[in-house]
Image (cartoon, rainbow, N blue to C red):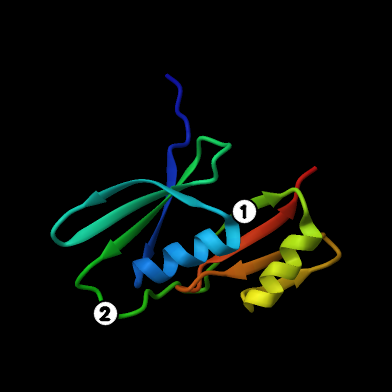
Amino acid sequence: MQFGFAHNNLNVLNLEKSLAFYKQALGLEEVRRNEKDDFTLVYLGDGHTPHLLELTWLKARTEPYNLGENEIHLAFTVDDYAAAHEKHAQMGCICYENPGMGIYFIADPDGYWLEIVPAK
């Protein structure tokens, strides 16, 4: 028996705002969508790996998600770290930097942290 990653899920309060953020900040594109009466699932891909990010929008939800201490994150590699850092600084979404490790984090509209790591 062998398991493989399919996707990660994040619940979002404002689907359109989140879609715009993930496209602008990370270049993720919608791969497929599943519309239901009370929720929508949108799967985003990076165009070169099979891994997907599933955004779940619960249509009736009006309260922001409680992320607790937000001790989990997703990580993204980037081929031009300096350009990515400049772009994210201009967007105002950098929430933590660790120059000693050569990484930084950005926060999405719901407050989820996304680690940016230079490609090796």
Question: Can residue 72 be seen from the camera position used here?
Answer: no
- Residue 118 vertical placement versus 85 (above, below): above
Q: Nearer the viewer, residue 94 or 86?
A: 86
User: For mark 1, what is the residue?
Assistant: 75
At a point 65% along the width and 60% down the height, the residue shown is 115
Q: Nearer the viewer, residue 113 or 20?
A: 20
Q: Quadrant of the N terminus?
A: top left
* Number of numbered discs overlaid on the protein picture: 2
Q: Quadrant of the C terminus?
A: top right
Q: Nearer the viewer, residue 76 or 2?
A: 76
Q: Mark 2 is on which residue type?
A: Thr
Q: Position of residue 74 (x, y in %)?
A: 56, 55
- Disc number at residue 62? 2
Left or right of residue 64: residue 77: right
- Pointer 2: residues within 10 angstroms few (<14), some, or many (20+)? few
Q: Position of residue 2 (x, y in %)?
A: 45, 22
Q: Position of residue 83 (x, y in %)?
A: 77, 61
At a point 32% along the width and 58% down the height, the residue shown is 56
Question: Can residue 38 be seen from the camera position used here?
Answer: yes
